[in-house]
Image (cartoon, rainbow, N blue to C red):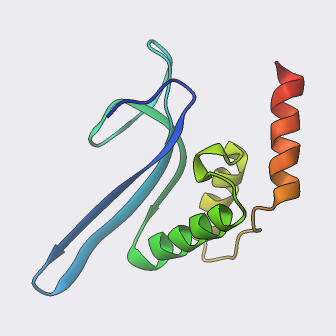
Amino acid sequence: MSFAPGSVFAFVRWTSNDFGTIISRIDILRAVAPGQRCSTVPYVRPGGEILLRLSGWPKVERLLQMIDAVEALGIDAADVAPDHWHHVHNRLSVNENPRPYTKARHQAWLHRQRVMR
């Protein structure tokens, strides 16, 4: 798979054995342009800008629920403001509840993108 520069995508890694899940990890990344600086991520070439990185099933499950909530608003999770994913990463990393993503926040993000062009 490949993604256009600036595209946001999630990469899930999950492994189990006879006793259950042993690894649960999710990364939300933004694809970079050729030659642009990026962080290396296993199985992602050349890498990407890391917006969120979580491991452990309870945190991964919570994030998947948050993605479902965003999509229930009629918003594609790939179109969410990148700073929201940073916020979610920071809050879930310390076992706190992130602010929910709202339609108003999304409209502000879209407006900010139009103004910055």
Is 110 displayed left or right of 13 in the figure?
right
76 in relation to 57, above or below: above
Is 7 displayed left or right of 75 in the figure?
left
Please name whichever residue, 75 or 109, is drawn nearer the observer in this view of the structure. Answer: 75
Q: For the point 46% across and 33% down, which residue is it? A: 48
**Count of numbered labels shown in the rendering:** 0
Please name whichever residue, 16 or 95, is drawn nearer the observer in this view of the structure. Answer: 16
Q: For the point 54% across and 75% down, which residue is it? A: 62
Outermost residue to the front: 74
Could you tell me residue 7's position as x and y percent?
54, 33
Could you tell me residue 18's position as x and y percent?
9, 84
Q: From the image, which quarter does the N terminus lie in?
A: top left
Q: Quadrant of residue 26?
A: bottom left
Q: Quadrant of residue 112?
A: top right
Please name whichever residue, 61 or 94, is drawn nearer the observer in this view of the structure. Answer: 61
Q: For the point 63% across and 62% down, which residue is it? A: 71
Could you tell me residue 76's position as x and y percent?
62, 51
Please name whichever residue, 61 or 39, is drawn nearer the observer in this view of the structure. Answer: 61
Is 90 displayed left or right of 110 in the figure?
left
Could you tell me residue 42's position as x and y percent?
29, 43
- Asked whether residue 51 is in view, the answer is yes
